Amino acid sequence: KAGVTQTPRYLIKTRGQQVTLSCSPISGHRSVSWYQQTPGQGLQFLFEYFSETQRNKGNFPGRFSGRQFSNSRSEMNVSTLELGDSALYLCASSTLGLNNEQFFGPGTRLTVL
Amino acid sequence: KQEVTQIPAALSVPEGENLVLNCSFTDSAIYNLQWFRQDPGKGLTSLLLIQSSQREQTSGRLNASLDKSSGRSTLYIAASQPGDSATYLCAVDNTDKLIFGTGTRLQVFP
């Protein structure tokens, strides 16, 4: 079974631009979560989608948004990029339920210049 | 607000040693606790998941325990190898999202 895939793996953008990251979950997984990892703040939860609905949201500004499609693939968008948005963005998928084990993708490394 | 702490922050040991990594959390109302491994610049690899009703889980040389009442989990690594060098993260799930600790950076030298 293929794992979680994320595209692109690396991105370089300039301040003020916007960016869209993509995540394809493990086949059969309907929950997709996004996390931001930085050296200073560690891993922080962005949001979680299940059946095309955002179920949970972390403490990030409205510039961070996401969506999920009917095939469970998810995208996240960051508008008006700031230098502090430079981070590794990780996507995780799970089946939910009692054994809600999260499986992570390789991440997208975003650098904002 | 759930807070997760991991001790030690870094650990350097010779090959063959048995290790204990510690994770503590402030809110015991968790669904489960998961241990991950992260290699530099890479994503997270799930090692073990312990449900809230369980006390421990084992996979190969790894054993994780959970004491919900005291807000603690330990990851035991037996007979460490250089390939175990990585950052180990614990994460608790109490509202359908993971709250991560800051990790323990492990280096195992030959």
Image (cartoon, coloured by chain):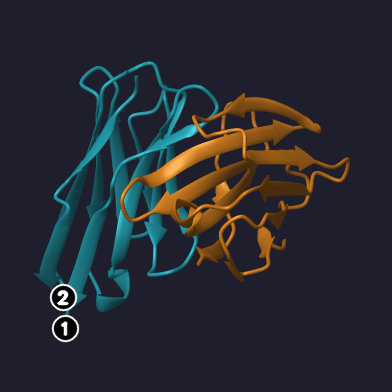
Question: At which x and y percent is residue A88?
Answer: 49, 59
Question: Does the image show residue A4?
Answer: yes
Q: Nearer the viewer, residue A48 or B27?
A: A48
On screen, residue A23 versus residue B7, left or right, reads right
Which chain appears cyan? B
Q: Amino acid at mark 2?
A: Glu
Q: Are marks 1 and 2 on the same chain?
A: yes
Q: Which residue is mark 1?
A: B110
Question: At which x and y percent is residue A13?
Answer: 60, 66
Q: Nearer the viewer, residue A105 or A90?
A: A90
Question: Does the image show residue B79?
Answer: no
Q: Secondary structure at mark 1?
A: loop
On screen, residue B7 versus residue A37, left or right, reads left
The quadrant of the image that shows the N terminus of chain B is top left
Rate crowding at label 2 as few (under 14), some (14 to 19) or many (20 or more) other CA atoms within 10 Å: some
Residue B15 tag number: 2
> Residues at badges 1 and 2 in contact (C-beta under 8 Å)?
yes
Label 1 is found on which chain of the structure?
B
Which chain appears orange? A
Q: Amino acid at mark 1?
A: Pro
Q: Earlier in the sequence, mark 1 or mark 2?
A: 2
Displayed quadrant of residue A55: top right
Q: CA distance from mark 1 to mark 2?
A: 5 Å
Q: Secondary structure at mark 2?
A: loop
The quadrant of the image that shows the C terminus of chain B is bottom left
